[in-house]
Amino acid sequence: MEPVEEVKSRLDIVDVVQEYLPMKPAGSGSFKGLCPFHHEKTPSFYANRPRQSWHCFGCDIGGDVISFVMKMEGMEFREALELLAQKTGVELPAFDPTKTTERKRMHEVNDLAARWFRAILLKDPRAEAARAYVAKRGIDGLTGDLWRIGYAPDGWTNLTDALKEKSVTEEELLKTGLVGRSERGSIYDRFRDRLMFTICDVHGNPVGFTGRILDTPPPVIPTEAQRSGGIPSSEKRQEAKYVNTPETSVYKKSLILYGLDKAKGDIKRQDLAVIVEGNMDAVSSHQFGVTNVVASSGTALTGEQLSLLKRFTRRLAIAFDADAAGNAATIRGLDLARGLDFDIRVITLAPEAGKDPDDAVRKDVALWKDAIAGAVPIVEWLYRNAFRGKDIHTPEGKKTIARAILPELRRIHDAVERDAWIERLAGDLTVSADALRDALRTTSASSSTVRTSATAPSRPQTDGRSSAEDPHPKKSREEMLRERVLAILEIRPELKSLAESILAMYPLRQEGDSDISQYLAILADREFEDQSPSKLQEELTTSATALRDEFLTQEGRRLELEMREAELAGDTVRINELLTQYRSLNT
Ligand SMILES: [Zn+2]
């Protein structure tokens, strides 16, 4: 039998559909439910067992089990087939058979570890404090099972010993990142005395873990490792709050959204993804029935995460931690999402709801639901943010506020909407709308407050029109070149001085770069891994030279603009200053 037919013959369309949405019998082997592909109140989505097909009378589309999964998961045919083949145990002729089996084995090893952590949490005497912690946080047994929450006991080889007994090799443990290797060459458990959250990929395969320290210190029972002088407890208390699996071939942090495997169905049904920061926020939210929630694990949204989400919805509602709200990295993630045409809202918790969604849910789930329902569009939120702590009565205050908001308004594509904002801003600042329109014309989109420095990634822009109306702002040439140079340096750090000598005053590494380093590593792999050292050096020289020229051109343009402004203002001192800068560029 052909593999495609083989896969289909082992599946039942109704079972597969039911993994995504509830279905009710509708006679003669048919089942019906609310269509996942359009909004409706009465079911017009049918799956038929004898024919092994599905059809929605609302959208007038239908097909077989593979087309259903393709549509549901936003997958290509091959991807969907692979997913279903995995479910049914059919071996597909793989593109790269060694890779497939290696991935599978890593999932298995992570699965064994998750089971072991879970079992420890449930009944091991060493997990007393962890159990108390979980109970205090209100996580019930079902949620714990579903989310595979566990406990890694203190000590250096607990997990290693347990998994070796299950025929897992040291090499496999190292590959999954469950263990580290000490300088002396022995391996040790990476997670010790930590509450364990299992991280799954979008299909529910366990790919990694986050280990969180318990808030309350555990009872002072010396463990095996401590008795043998392993870890002084004072040192242990200084450890990081969270420890994560390092990047592995199945765990790429920039690709993972915690809980997406469990939330994706509801995200699609509600056409809305709620993004929270902490794992616990997501877990509690699901336990209390708000199930379209994923956690970004405290980092800015990446392009990969966004394209994953795009399969399920284009509407995001984001709940920031109060202190992360103004954070440049957080806002950069939003910037990216706006550029990708996501509709973004920002959730603000009422003061009585507590400090994070987890707090809110446990006080009263209605507080959390209300906060989600009351999420405001990103522009509205940025607008309100710009006023925070500023004096709207002084000219200085007005200027600061306008400078913060105008770049955001400039990015609104719809002219009518943009103008409505201008009118509102004019009213709130009691300045003339015309003055603001003038200012808007001279504001460049890249000088927005969310940019941390003048040379941070900027959108391509020559004049106001093209930039404001480009619905898909792309990376600027400067940004792309900079990434190329940095990616080459990832592979060949010894070329750094060459790069620096070409780039001279150009700041290659910038503040807030750490969250793109994973992206750079991927870029480096994809573009440069196979190239010879001499080819790489040549490539670096070309890219760095182009980058320097691009930077000088941009700087020149910026200075020209400023000079024109200074000229209009009749500020001769400033003009001379700018001229000096301008000349120094061209020497
Ligand atoms: Zn439909």
Image (spheres, grey):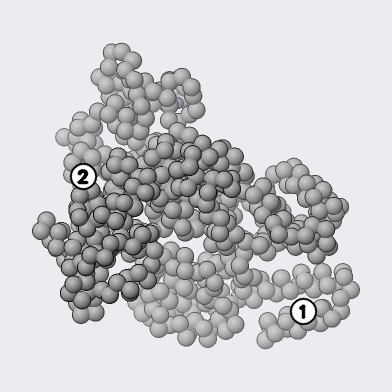
The residue mark sitting in front, 1 or 2, is: 1
**Quadrant where the N terminus lies?**
top left
Residue, disc 1: 578
Q: Nearer the viewer, residue 454 or 244?
A: 244
* Left or right relative to 218: residue 43: right
In the image, taking residue 462 as reference, residue 345 lies left or right, namely left
- Left or right of 230, for residue 236: right
Name the residue tied to disc 2.
92
Q: Find the distance from the CA under tag 1 to the CA under tag 2.
A: 65 Å
Which one is in front, 107 or 185?
185
Q: Residue at x 52, y 55 (%)?
A: 321
| Residue at left offset 73%, top offset 80% | 582
What secondary structure is marked by label 2?
Answer: loop
Quarter holding ligand 1: top left
Q: Position of residue 551 (x, y in %)?
A: 62, 74
Q: Amino acid at mark 2?
A: Leu
